[in-house]
Amino acid sequence: MQRYLLLRLAQTVMALFGVTMLVFALTRLSGDILDMMLPAEATAEDFARVEKLWGLDKPLVIQYGVYMGNVFKGDWGRSYRFHGDVLQVVIKRFPATVQLAAVTLAWSTIVGVSLGVLVANKKDTPFDLGGKLIALLGQSLPSFWTGIVLVWVFAVILGWLPVQGKGGIKHMILPAITLGWFNVAALMRLTRSAMLDVLDSEYVKLARIKGLPEWKVIWKHCLRNAAIAPLTYFGVLAGFFLTGSVVIETVFNWPGTGLLAVEAIERRDYMVVQAVVLFMAGIFIITNLVVDILYAYLDPRIRYN
């Protein structure tokens, strides 16, 4: 187990290092940073002054070294559009993303896993057919289209829910449903498939022969052994809710890091773009590391592969 943990930690560090290189390179390839920072009427003297001020007159390798050194010290740069420390700008928006992600993760996990267990026990029935239809629609409809339709129906026509912005629980319902709809379908399919394999196993037949209540056989013995496949997806799921909410936050004007990334791109604030991508990539990678550790705990065979 210790060897497995050390290997995964080393892979995590390498992945984070690779992300920093990729993000740093892409922000430079997107165009001349000075053209993004300065207005069209700027003079050659203005370009030279800003270039020296931001250290852009040095070779890219040195710029990257300086950037990484500052990142390790907690200095992720300063935003010239949001007027403040970049890391503080990101952290200020992060709680809104976590709030939305937590609600979405809770309801999509509960609904997705529960539906997966139920449709597996009702195989080849109308209930199972309905579950397959939910899975098909959930994984086929684009999230931005789903969000727009939900806004049109529940906010515009019926007037039950607010259209956008952050507020009470009503403000979270539409973005949470839109963000989690795809993953409800995915979790349901994974749980159904895993449960069908477990339901045909010998130990389940033995548990029923011993006279255990059916609910205990299904929800305690079967679900625990079928949880490995959904757990593998759970890491992707948690990371997606935290890092992949750019579209949903934009549609519903939810003031999180996803919307911050869009605003930074529109305002050409490359320092904020770098910080958001690096921050979110780190969360995604670390989340998957935690899931891999849990995966190895549930299935000891993983530790030796």
Image: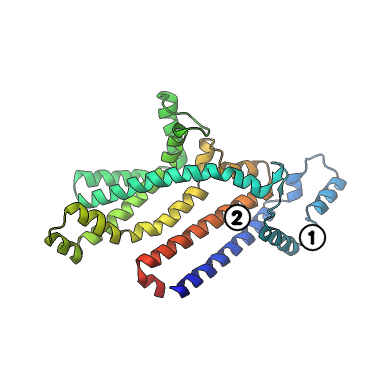
Q: Which one is earlier in the sequence, the residue at label 1 or at label 2? A: 1
Q: Give the amino acid type for the residue marked by disc 1 in the picture.
A: Lys
> Which x, y percent locates residue 79?
70, 46
Disc 1 versus disc 2: distance between alpha carbons?
22 Å
Name the residue nearer the viewer: 149 or 195.
195
Label 1: element kind: loop
Left or right of 14 in this view: 231: left
- Residue highlighted by disc 1: 58
User: Residue at coordinates 46% horizontally, 73% vertically from top-left?
Assistant: 2
User: Residue at coordinates 56% horizontally, 64% vertically from top-left?
Assistant: 15
- Residue highlighted by disc 2: 278
How packed mark 2 is, by other alpha carbons closer than 10 Å (few <14, some 14-19, many 20 or more), is: many
User: Residue at coordinates 64% horizontally, 61% vertically from top-left?
Assistant: 21
Left or right of 178 in this view: 207: left
How packed mark 1 is, by other alpha carbons closer than 10 Å (few <14, some 14-19, many 20 or more), is: few
The image quarter containing residue 17 is bottom right
Quadrant placement of the C terminus = bottom left
Q: Residue furthest right?
A: 45
> Which x, y percent locates residue 113?
32, 50
Residue 253 visible in rendering? yes
> Which x, y percent locates residue 94?
56, 45
Left or right of 212 in this view: 184: right
Q: Nearer the viewer, mark 1 or mark 2?
A: 2
